[in-house]
Image (cartoon, rainbow, N blue to C red):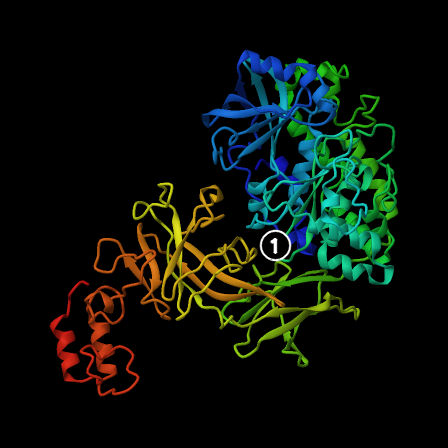
């Protein structure tokens, strides 16, 4: 990071330390695809016919992708990716002379990516004479800990023709979500005009509407499209539209991250982002976090900011009364609640105090302008739509171009900061808490986590067992209580309840002024114990199947085996399998019958097209887990689970020493105890090496000590009775000594 950029980002620690919901998100490194101090070059090559189709005005709104070659050149070298997909992107910009493009690496080659990206957005920013605004806003949001894309400038050539200076913007998709949340299995919606969150009834299908003038949903589901479940959208709109005022806060916070919304609104109000939800009910994402089930709003498309105003004075607009087009029920109801208005004002002040000032933006803008000057002045396409000349770029920081560009970037920031300071002079620090537990519960241990705003004196978890009285437990921010890192405003606690069936819980924070917010409003419940009446167990798994066994289509996929450990025929229909606690129902078993003592393998290859016994995830040999769950009136409860670390041996498996046994051992291909998919596990004792008592495939000192430790045992002997005569005696000692050093 250069010194100027570092100075512009300075001062964000205070903001981050006071953050609530933003603290849990990660801010990924830029990486080679988003160079901070260099304008890289992107070269696209498409056929002449395909290029003519793309440029034809009659096809401006086509989303058909065309095959192309992608070349990325920087000081580090050159990358070439063949057979990528290219199309136009944007809304009204599709009709501009300076086009914006989407590059998809996985359109024609399934699973393909480049530097961890499946897609890139090349934005022309045709209405911005600086071509800096969107980048500066995204960078500032990232510096403040917001969920925001990575961004850089690039030169773009198509078929050898220089198309100009572009902003290279990270696409919001599953990879984007994974890099911010460490999970990506929640529902993600792209919300475009007019996604106003108006109540349309209880039926989720009603929210899949397509306006007569559009060919796509305004709430467009981007993940989990097979399920196509709009229940979360319907529930949010129902709460907004129907819940009375005295219940609204509680009901809304149970399903929606209000704090993240207020932080996003504060940022967008300061940068003058009017083409968003709170302005034009447009351009945002909603992500349903599987960790707590809450929807979170994420900013999108920030090119109309920092003095691009189109007839309104956003630099002096009232912080608490954002101008609007049409109704925005969520914003209107939230702003009608005093504590939310107060919190919005405080978040505005925090941003103002941590880098939102004209001098910092002038300094950073000067660095970027110098970096981009050559590429910008050579860009003839930037002049075609509005007549921007060279001075429109060179004077972009302090001078006004006129028309829709009312102020230069630094000038706008100065005006906006002065106005916002005056409007938020009485803003008070928020005092709030958000919390959740991890379900399904495993190991009879409830894991409670909470995030707080402000500086509480204490944070507590309140837990009731089986309908009994609530007991209070202190939660800690020490880095060892399941809370994250020490001092990150996240608090945690692990509580073991081996004899409980159901727990109810809530959390609270206590502040020096006596405030004591709680979350959730109504205590939540979780099933704490394992399900004991389910006849199935996880029996064996292979997390690195390089060449051991193929699935029905010839692939070497990871696999897990379940076993029917009962004496009756059983159907696993409705059981769920996952490797992510945040999504217990990642794979739900179909209906079929398993004989008593029989087995069935599920392939973990993330390829549902290969058949009903293929799960939508892979296994990680280095560290992973599997949870088998069932749904009941309390939610998902654990049937069985296994966690592992450092199992990198290819073609080896982890399995119960014999079917249904408590002990897990490693089965190694090519030994006397190989993996046994769809067959009974043959542990060391069953494999003709009964002297290997500890299952390490070697008769050694620990095996001798196990026999000696049980010498004289006549009942309930764990392992020492090698000869099976009912007593651990001299014969067993002689047997193990005679086999000492044998590899099993």
Q: Is residue 603 left or right of residue 699?
A: right
- Tell me the quarter of the picture where residue 554 sits: top left
Does 375 sit above or below residue 548? Answer: above
**Quadrant for the C terminus in the image:** bottom left
* Mark 1 neighbour density, 10 Å: few (under 14) some (14–19) many (20 or more): many
Quadrant position of residue 352: top right
Q: Is residue 639 placed above or below 31 in the rendered structure?
A: below
Q: Position of residue 743 (x, y in %)?
A: 17, 63
Q: Nearer the viewer, residue 355 or 463?
A: 463
Q: Secondary structure at mark 1?
A: loop
Instruction: In this rendered view, identify the residue nearer to me: 172 or 60.
Output: 60
Say if 646 sits above or below 38 in the image. below
Q: Residue at x 60, y 31 (%)?
A: 152
Residue 350 shows in the view: no
Q: Nearer the viewer, residue 244 or 382?
A: 244
Between 705 and 576, the one lying in front of the other is 576
Which percent across, then down, holds residue 602? 42, 53
Asked if residue 322 can be seen in this view, the reply is: yes
The residue at the point 72 percent across, 27 percent down is 91
Q: Is residue 733 left or right of residue 33?
A: left
Which residue was labeled with disc 1? 290
Q: Quadrant of the N terminus?
A: top right
Q: Position of residue 208 (x, y in %)?
A: 72, 41
| Residue sitting at x 22%, y 65% | 687
Q: Position of residue 465 (x, y in %)?
A: 62, 78
How many numbered markers are drawn?
Answer: 1
């Amino acid at each position: 990071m250069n010194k100027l950029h570092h100075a512009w980002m300075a001062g964000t620690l205070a903001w981050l330390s006071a953050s609530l919901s933003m603290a849990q998100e990660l801010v990924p490194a830029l990486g080679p695809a988003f160079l901070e101090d260099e304008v890289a070059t992107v070269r696209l090559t498409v056929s002449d016919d395909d290029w003519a189709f793309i440029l034809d005005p009659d096809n401006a709104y086509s989303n058909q992708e065309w095959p192309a070659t992608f070349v990325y050149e920087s000081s580090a070298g050159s990358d070439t990716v063949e057979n990528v997909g290219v199309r136009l992107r944007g809304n009204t910009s599709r009709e501009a002379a300076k086009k914006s493009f989407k590059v998809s690496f996985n359109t024609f080659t399934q699973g393909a990516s480049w530097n961890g990206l499946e897609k890139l957005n090349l934005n022309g920013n045709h209405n911005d004479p600086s071509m800096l605004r969107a980048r500066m806003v995204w960078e500032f949001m990232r510096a403040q800990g917001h969920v925001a894309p990575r961004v850089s400038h690039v030169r773009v050539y198509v078929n050898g023709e220089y198309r100009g200076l572009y902003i290279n913007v990270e696409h919001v998709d599953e990879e984007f979500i994974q890099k911010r949340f460490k999970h990506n299995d929640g529902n993600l919606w792209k919300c475009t005009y007019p996604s106003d969150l108006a109540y349309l009834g209880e039926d989720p299908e009603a929210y899949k509407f397509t306006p007569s003038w559009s060919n796509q949903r305004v709430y467009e589901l981007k993940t989990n499209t097979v399920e196509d479940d709009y229940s979360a959208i319907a529930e949010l709109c129902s709460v907004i539209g129907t819940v009375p005022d005295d219940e609204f806060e509680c009901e809304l916070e149970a399903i929606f991250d209000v704090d993240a919304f207020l932080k996003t609104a504060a940022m967008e109000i300061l940068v003058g982002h009017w083409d968003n939800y709170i302005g034009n009910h447009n351009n945002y994402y909603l992500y349903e976090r599987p960790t707590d089930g809450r929807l979170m709003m994420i900013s999108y498309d920030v090119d109309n900011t920092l003095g691009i105003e189109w007839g309104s004075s956003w630099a002096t607009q009232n912080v608490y009364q954002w101008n609007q087009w049409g109704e925005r029920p969520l914003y209107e109801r939230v702003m009608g609640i005093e504590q939310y208005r107060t919190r919005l004002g405080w978040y505005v002040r925090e941003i103002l105090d941590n880098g939102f000032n004209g001098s910092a933006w002038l300094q950073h803008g000067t660095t970027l302008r110098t970096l981009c000057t050559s590429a910008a002045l050579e860009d003839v396409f930037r002049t075609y739509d509005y007549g921007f000349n060279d001075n429109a770029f060179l004077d972009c920081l302090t001078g006004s171009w006129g028309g829709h560009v009312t102020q230069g970037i630094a000038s706008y920031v100065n005006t906006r900061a002065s106005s916002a300071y005056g409007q938020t002079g009485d803003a008070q620090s928020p005092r709030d808490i958000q919390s959740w537990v991890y379900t399904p519960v495993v190991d009879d241990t409830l894991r409670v986590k909470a995030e707080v705003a402000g500086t509480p004196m204490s944070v507590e978890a309140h837990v009731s067992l089986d309908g009994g009285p609530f007991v209070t437990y202190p939660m800690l921010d020490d880095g060892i209580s399941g809370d994250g890192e020490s001092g990150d405003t996240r608090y945690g606690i692990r509580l073991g309840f081996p004899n409980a069936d159901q727990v109810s819980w809530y959390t609270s924070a206590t502040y020096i002024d006596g405030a004591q917010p709680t979350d959730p409003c109504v205590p939540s419940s979780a099933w704490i114990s394992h399900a004991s009446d389910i006849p199935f167990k996880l029996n064996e798994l292979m997390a690195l199947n390089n060449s051991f066994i193929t699935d029905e289509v010839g692939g070497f996929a990871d696999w897990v085996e379940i076993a029917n450990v009962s004496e009756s025929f059983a159907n696993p229909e409705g059981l769920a399998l996952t490797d992510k606690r945040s999504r217990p129902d990642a794979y739900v078993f179909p209906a079929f019958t398993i004989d008593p003592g029989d087995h069935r393998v599920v392939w973990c290859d993330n390829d549902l097209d290969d058949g009903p016994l293929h799960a939508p995830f892979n296994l990680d040999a280095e560290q992973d887990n599997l949870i088998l769950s069932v749904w009941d009136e309390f939610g998902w409860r654990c049937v069985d689970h296994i966690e592992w670390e450092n199992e990198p041996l290819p073609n080896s498996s982890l399995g119960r020493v014999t079917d249904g046994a408590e002990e897990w051992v490693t089965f190694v291909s090519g030994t006397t105890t190989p993996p046994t998919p769809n067959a009974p596990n043959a542990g060391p004792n069953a494999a003709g090496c009964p002297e290997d008592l500890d299952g390490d495939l070697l008769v050694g000192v620990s095996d001798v000590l196990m026999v000696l430790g049980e010498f004289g045992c006549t009942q309930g002997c764990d392992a020492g009775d090698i000869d099976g005569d009912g007593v651990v005696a001299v014969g067993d000692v002689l047997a193990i000594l005679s086999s000492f050093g044998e590899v099993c």
